[in-house]
Image (cartoon, rainbow, N blue to C red):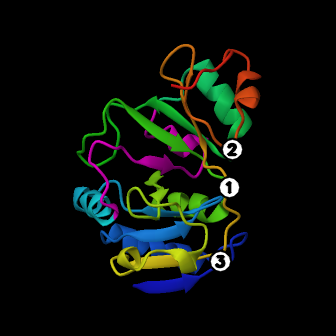
Amino acid sequence: MRHLRLDLRNPDPLAIREAVRVLKQGGIVAFPTDTLYGLACDPTNRDALDALYRLKGRAPSLRLPFVAAGISQAAGVVRLESEIARRLAGRFWPGPLTLVLPLLPDHPLAPWKWGKTLAVRVPAAPVARELAREAGIPIPATSANLSGDPSVSHPNRLEQALLSRLDLLLDGGPLPGGLPSTVLDVTVSPPRLLRPGAISRQSLSSVPGVGPLETI
């Protein structure tokens, strides 16, 4: 496994380009998000997706969350046409809000059991946004741990079983940890809170059209 250190606030473009080169070759990259370390692969490469699932020991029925460089990039993969979705994205992106949105029928992702929706967010973390921007497509951002194990906010705590099978670690040092992103399904009306997280129920409910939220 290769190991590159980088500045969280001002990531070296050369390190970002190298990480994307690894992704385009079918590799798996660990990288810092807002609060925790995540894993990415090239979502247009079916073999890379399969390798990511095998690495984590993740059940194929569990779909991957994605990060995008911005609203316009996200709109190349999912429908952001509803007024509520646009309001939420405009208010909370970049930030820790994951929206479950309709997947475009002509999406550029590899053939996979994606279903009809995709969970995506625009993170506050510059490293994650720059990776997606350089890749030219939203990228998976599943937690950098073996399935069922705790999430990791310090690169020194990444499991050896994971590190030994990674292709590249972008090491931004310790992250603040804390709550994961809030996950909100906006394909239904009213929207449904799938996972409480860093953005409170009250903040979401204050957006016109969202209304009171119940967790399923």
Q: Residue 67 carries which label?
A: none
**In this view, 216 is above or below 95:** above
Amino acid type of the residue that numbered disc 2 sits on in the rendered structure = Ala
Q: Position of residue 96 (x, y in %)?
A: 65, 46
Left or right: 89 with respect to 186?
right
* Residue 64, position as x, y percentages in the image: 40, 48
Q: Residue at position x 61%, y 45% from top? A: 181
**Crowd rating for badge 1 (residues with CA inside 10 Å; few <14, some 14–19, many 20+):** few
Taking the magenta stretch, the answer to whether it contains residue 86 is no
Q: Which of 182 and 74 is in front in this view?
A: 182
Magenta-drawn stretch contains 63:
yes
Which is nearer the N-term, disc 3 or disc 2?
3
3 and 2 marks in contact (CB < 8 Å): no
The residue pinned by badge 1 equals 178
- Magenta stretch: dominant SS? loop
- Determine the image quadrant of residue 28: bottom left
Magenta span = 56-78
Q: In this rendering, is residue 190 above or below 110?
A: above
Q: Which residue lies furthest to the front in this view?
A: 149
The residue lying at 48 percent from left, 77 percent from top is 169
Q: Dot 2: few (<14), some (14–19), or many (≥20) neighbours within 10 Å?
A: some
Kindly indicate whether the residue at mark 1 contacts the one at mark 2 (C-beta within 8 angstroms). yes
Mark yes or no: residue 33 visible: yes
- Residue position marked by numbered label 3 in the rendering: 173
Which residue is at 24% across, 44% downward? 112
Q: What residue type is labelled 1?
A: Gly
- Element on which disc 2 rests: loop
Looking at the figure, which quarter contains the N terminus? bottom left
